[in-house]
Image (cartoon, rainbow, N blue to C red):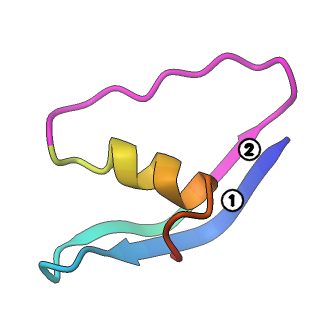
Amino acid sequence: MINLQNISYIHLSKDLLFRDINLTVNNHDKIALIGNNGIGKSTLLKIIARELQP
């Protein structure tokens, strides 16, 4: 299970990517992250993988 609560992230360029987002993914759930380039999809995955600190 993945559970994120009240996650915010400001990029090095000082751009706010997320403000107080919540996400719960249960075991065996299938999700897709879609959106334009630079919107924060990879950043969110890096936060989940603990490569970045929110």
How crowded is the residue under tag 2: few (<14 C-alpha within 10 Å), some, or many (20+)?
Answer: few
Q: Amino acid at mark 2?
A: Thr
Check disc 2 and report its element: helix, strand or loop.
strand
Say which residue label 1 marks: 4
Check disc 1 and report its element: helix, strand or loop.
strand
Viewer-proximal residue among 21 and 52: 52
35, above or below 30, in the image = below
Q: Amino acid at mark 1?
A: Leu
Q: Residue 13: name its quadrant.
A: bottom left
Say which residue label 2 marks: 24
Left or right: where does residue 21 sit relative to residue 37? right
Residue at 34% in and 26% down: 34
Rendered location of residue 42, percent (x, y): 37, 45
Q: Earlier in the sequence, mark 1 or mark 2?
A: 1
Report the label total.
Answer: 2
Q: Residue 4: name its quadrant.
A: bottom right
Rendered location of residue 3, percent (x, y): 77, 53
Residue at 43% in and 29% down: 33
Q: Which residues are magenta?
A: 23-37
Residue at 17% in and 74% down: 15
Is mark 1 in CB contact (under 8 Å) with mark 2? yes
Q: Which mark is residue 17?
A: none
Q: CA distance from mark 1 to mark 2?
A: 6 Å
